[in-house]
Image: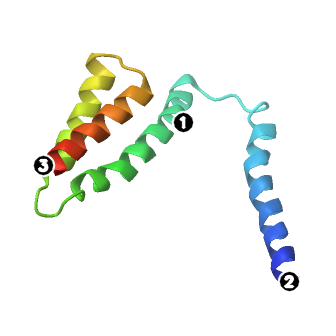
Amino acid sequence: MNYILLALCMMVVTYGVRLLPSFITDKIKISPKAEKFLNLIPFTALGALIFPGVLSVDASRWYVGAVGALAAIVLSCIKRMPTAVTVIVSVLVTMLFFL
C-alpha cells in the first residue's frame, strides 16, 4: 500500500510542476527573441540525445550511423519529406550500411 501512495504522490507532484507554467505564462509577457529561444529548446535537446547514438551504432564502423544521419538530414531539409518517411528511410539506410 505504501508504494501505491508513493506513486500517487509522485504523480501529483509531476502533474503540478507541468501544470503550473500553463497558468503563469498567460500573465507574463515574453519578448519575441526569448520566445524563439524557448521554442528551439526541444529541438536542441533532441539533437543532444540523438548525436551520441549516431556515433555509437557500431564501434568499429563509425560511418554507419553517420550515413543514416546524413540520409535523414538530406530527406528532411532538401526533399521536405514527411517525418515518418524520413525516419523509415534513414533507418533502412542505416540497416543497409550495417549489414
Q: Residue 79: percent from the left, percent from the top?
A: 29, 16
- The outermost residue toward the bottom is 2
Give the residue pinned by disc 1.
Answer: 38
Q: Is residue 5 left or right of residue 49?
A: right
| Chain-order first, disc 1 or disc 3 | 1
Provide the residue designation for mark 3. 63
Q: CA distance from mark 2 to mark 3?
A: 50 Å
Which disc is residue 2 wearing? 2
Q: Is residue 65 left or right of residue 63?
A: right
Residue 7 vertical placement versus 27 (above, below): below
| Displayed quadrant of residue 83 | top left
Q: Residue 30: percent from the left, percent from the top?
A: 64, 29
Mark 2 or mark 3: name the one nearer the start of the chain: 2
Residue at horizontal 27%, vertical 30%?
A: 73
Mark 3: secondary structure: helix
Residue at image position (59%, 26%) is: 31
Residue shown at 77% from the left, 67% from the top: 10
Q: Is residue 75 above or below residue 17?
A: above
Q: Is residue 97 left or right of residue 15?
A: left
Q: Nearer the viewer, mark 2 or mark 1?
A: 2
Image coordinates of residue 99 in percent, x first then y, are 16, 50
